[in-house]
Amino acid sequence: MTYSEVVKKGWILPYKSKYTMRDVNSVLCDSLFANEKTLSEKEAKFIVNCAAVYHDSDISDSLLGLTTNH
């Protein structure tokens, strides 16, 4: 998954001044009910991070570890 794919698919979240794990959990929950595949936590964090970049917003400390494996 790339930034351009996230934008192209319309997965950019609405503007917020700061994105948090609550946004990640919301993306994960929404993916459970979408017609596409269920996202992993890493993918959901990436989507939230893309939204923060797109809107030039901040992210919480809990989202800084995007490349860690859980």
Image (tube, rainbow, N blue to C red):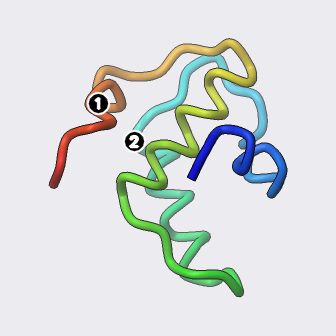
Tag 2's secondary structure? helix
Q: Residues within 10 Å of mark 1 (few under 14, many from 20)?
A: few
Instruction: Identify the residue at horizontal 64%, vertical 17% (top origin).
Output: 17
Above or below residue 16? Residue 14 is below
Instruction: Identify the residue at horizontal 44%, vertical 56% (top origin).
Output: 25
Instruction: Identify the residue at horizontal 78%, vertical 43% (top origin).
Output: 7
Above or below residue 19? Residue 46 is below
Q: Give the residue type at disc 2.
A: Met
Task: State the image coordinates of residue 28 (x, y, percent, origin top left).
Answer: 49, 64
Instruction: Identify the residue at horizontal 39%, vertical 22% (top origin).
Output: 60
Task: State the image coordinates of residue 52 (x, y, percent, origin top left).
Answer: 62, 25
Above or below residue 22? Residue 37 is below
- How much space separates mark 2 and mark 1, taking CA atoms? 7 Å
**46 relative to 2 in the view: left or right:** left
Above or below residue 50? Residue 64 is above
Tag 1's secondary structure? helix
Residue 62's label in the rendered image is 1
Task: State the image coordinates of residue 5 (x, y, percent, origin top left).
Answer: 72, 50
Q: Residues within 10 Å of mark 2 (few under 14, many from 20)?
A: some
**7 relative to 19 in the view: left or right:** right
> Which quadrant does the C terminus fall into?
bottom left
Would you say the residues marked 2 and 1 are in contact, meaning their CB atoms lie under 8 Å apart? yes
Q: Nearer the viewer, residue 43 or 33?
A: 43
**59 relative to 10 in the view: left or right:** left
Q: Give the residue type at disc 1.
A: Ser
Q: Nearer the viewer, residue 1 or 46?
A: 1
Q: Write down the quadrant of residue 54 in the picture.
A: top right
Q: Nearer the viewer, residue 69 or 60?
A: 69
Residue 21's label in the rendered image is 2
